[in-house]
Every structure is written in structure tokens, then in C-alpha cells.
Image (cartoon, rainbow, N blue to C red):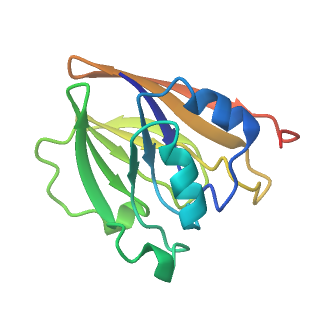
Amino acid sequence: MKLAILSDTHGLLRQPVAEYLRSADAILHGGDINNQALADQLKQYAPLYLVRGNNDKEWANAIPSLLTVTLGGVTFRIVHNRKDLPEDFSGVDAVVFGHSHKYLEEERDGILWLNPGSCGPRRFHQEITMMMAEAADGKLRVEKITIPHEAP
């Protein structure tokens, strides 16, 4: 199963990101999507698993702040800010989060921690990044995708 992992799009779907979404079987979004229109647009590519971020206001009241989903035999816990995670990680293989706009891929205590960074408007002079991942038979392989700053 091919997964696109995004966060902090802040209302912007860049064309290169959309190209990656075309091949995705599912999209995991770590919050700060910023509006319903973008959520609806992402759903046109693949099933969307989305959590509410700190910039997702009244329009996002129905979106959960924490979500657990199993895809390709891999159980993901998705949250916007990792400090809001509950302490129990039983059965969790990977944590997807955002908020910092900084890419992170790190294994700790048997759990893969994934922050795809931000592929929305560029902030703080950081890279524009996302992840593509392959989940199969309970195993996860992740690839960092860097989007050129000039990309629309």
C-alpha cells in the first residue's frame, strides 16, 4: 500500500505534491490543513486520514485531534503536536505528527516517529517536505520527498 504522508499544508496544495498524491492509496495528514476545501481536494486523490491542527479552527470541529489507523498491516497513531499524545503506545508501529514544520524520521523503542515537515507555504526558511511510504505485511518503508522552493 502506497501512502502519502503530509502535514502543515496551511491551505496550499503545491503541484508537485499533487503529482505524488496521484499514486497514493491513502493520505495521512498531520493537521493544519486550514480549510475544508483543501480537505475535499485531497479526498479526490485517495482516502484521507486527517487530524485537527492548532490552526484548524471552527470549520474543523468534527475532525479528531488523535486518530489510530492500520494500513498495510502497520498501525499508525496520528496527532498534530506530539506533546498531545497519550502515553500508551501499545499496538502502535508508527506515530505521524506535524506542527514543527521540521522533517523527522526516527525509530525509538520500536516505534517509528514520522514528521513529514511542511509542504504548504514555506516558513522559517525550512525545506518544503513530505513523505511517501510503502506499507505491506506490517513493514513500513519511508522516503523523504523534498519539494523545490520555487514549485507552485
Q: Is residue 113 left or right of residue 120?
A: left
List x then y, in percent, for residue 41.
57, 50
Q: Report the front residue among 45 and 152.
A: 45
Above or below residue 25? Residue 31 is below
Q: Quadrant of residue 65?
A: bottom left
**Quarter placement of the N terminus:** top left
Residue at (60, 50) in percent of width and height: 102
Q: Is residue 135 left or right of residue 87?
A: right
Above or below residue 69? Residue 9 is below
Q: Is residue 84 left or right of residue 98?
A: left
Which residue is most to the bottom? 58
Residue at (61, 28) in percent of width and height: 20
Q: Report the front residue among 35 and 44.
A: 44
List x then y, in percent, for residue 93.
23, 36
Residue at (58, 67) in percent of width and height: 35
Which residue is most to the left? 90
Which residue is most to the top? 137
List x then y, in percent, for residue 5.
48, 39
Number of numbered discs overlaid on the protein picture: 0
Residue at (74, 37) in percent of width and height: 15
Q: Is residue 79 left or right of residue 4?
A: left
**Quarter placement of the C terminus:** top right
List x then y, in percent, for residue 44.
52, 42
